[in-house]
Image (spheres, rainbow, N blue to C red):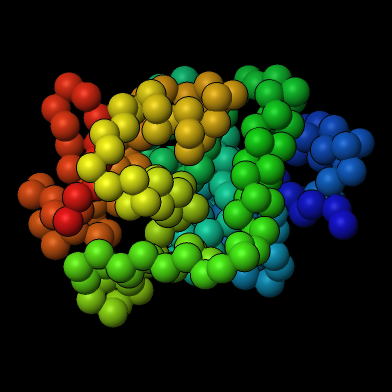
């Protein structure tokens, strides 16, 4: 069954090029040219991955990403015409899984898509037995990929869940930012360790009562992060 990709960009030549190249690889590609059109399509259809430009008419890509995250964990790769770090960090802050800076090589785009879909496919495979971890008032259901704090569900992105799952199932083990980047994002991921810092900060904001004094996800200064309750 063909994997479904939504490409969102107001530059029609870029969309045309991406669409042609992905369709050559067997993907089913849909296109949107502004933020409002993209939101309507995401609400009405299911996609395996979204390529989302930051600079869009009617509603910018960051706002689109933020709204999508309110109801879906579909993988999102942000596209930005600027090379500034702030654009990349903002994309991750709003729940994006990855980012690519324009101008980009279409081979890089396809490699990122394949890597993310490969990981998503592994997560979809059923386990032989249910894996539920309960620590204090945190409950983590790895089959349904849901997290609860004091019985209330917390909406994590795919990457936030992956980071938390790794830490929870390896309590007190300190992971460097490089290790987390390699394990969760993959060795082929070209991003830097600040990606990890952004996701840890967002994770703490969601699961910690006081993110500045975390109860679960701790920092080993100069080394990395670890889980302890």
Q: Is residue 40 left or right of residue 216?
A: right
Q: Residue 112: where, in percent of width, then height? A: 65, 32
Q: Residue at x 68, y 43 (%)?
A: 118
Check the image and name the residue furthest to the bottom: 151
Asked whether the viewer can see residue 37, the reply is: no
Q: Residue at x 23, y 42 (%)?
A: 172
Q: Residue 156: where, in percent of width, then height? A: 40, 59
Q: Residue at x 17, y 36 (%)?
A: 219
Quarter assignment of residue 178: top left
Q: Nearer the viewer, residue 172 or 125?
A: 172
Which quadrant is home to the C terminus?
A: bottom left
Q: Residue 50: where, in percent of width, then height? A: 64, 49
Q: How many marks?
A: 0
Q: Is residue 95 left or right of residue 173?
A: right
Q: Is residue 169 above or below residue 46?
A: above
Q: Is residue 17 above or below residue 95?
A: above
Asked whether the viewer can see residue 43, the reply is: yes
Which quadrant is home to the N terminus?
A: bottom right
Check the image and name the residue furthest to the left: 213
């Amino acid at each position: 069954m063909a994997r479904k990709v939504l490409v969102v960009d107001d530059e029609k030549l870029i969309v045309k090029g991406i669409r042609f190249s992905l369709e050559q690889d067997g993907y089913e590609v849909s296109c949107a040219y502004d933020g409002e059109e993209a939101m309507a399509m995401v609400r009405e259809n299911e996609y395996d991955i979204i390529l989302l430009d930051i600079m869009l008419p009617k509603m910018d890509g960051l706002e689109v990403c933020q709204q999508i995250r309110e109801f879906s964990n579909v993988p999102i790769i942000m596209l930005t015409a600027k090379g500034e770090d702030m654009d990349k960090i903002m994309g991750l802050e709003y729940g994006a899984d990855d980012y690519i800076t324009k101008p980009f090589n279409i081979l890089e785009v396809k490699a990122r898509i394949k890597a993310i879909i490969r990981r998503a496919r592994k997560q979809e495979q059923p386990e032989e037995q249910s894996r539920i971890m309960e620590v204090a008032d945190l409950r983590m259901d790895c089959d349904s990929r849901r997290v609860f704090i004091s019985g209330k569900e917390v909406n994590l992105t795919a990457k936030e869940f992956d980071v938390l799952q790794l830490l929870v199932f390896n309590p007190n083990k300190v992971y460097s930012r490089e290790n987390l980047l390699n394990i969760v994002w993959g060795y082929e991921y070209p991003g830097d360790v600040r990606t990890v810092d952004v996701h840890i900060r967002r994770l703490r904001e969601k699961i910690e009562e006081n993110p500045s004094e975390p109860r679960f996800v701790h920092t080993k200064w100069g080394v990395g992060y670890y889980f302890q309750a």
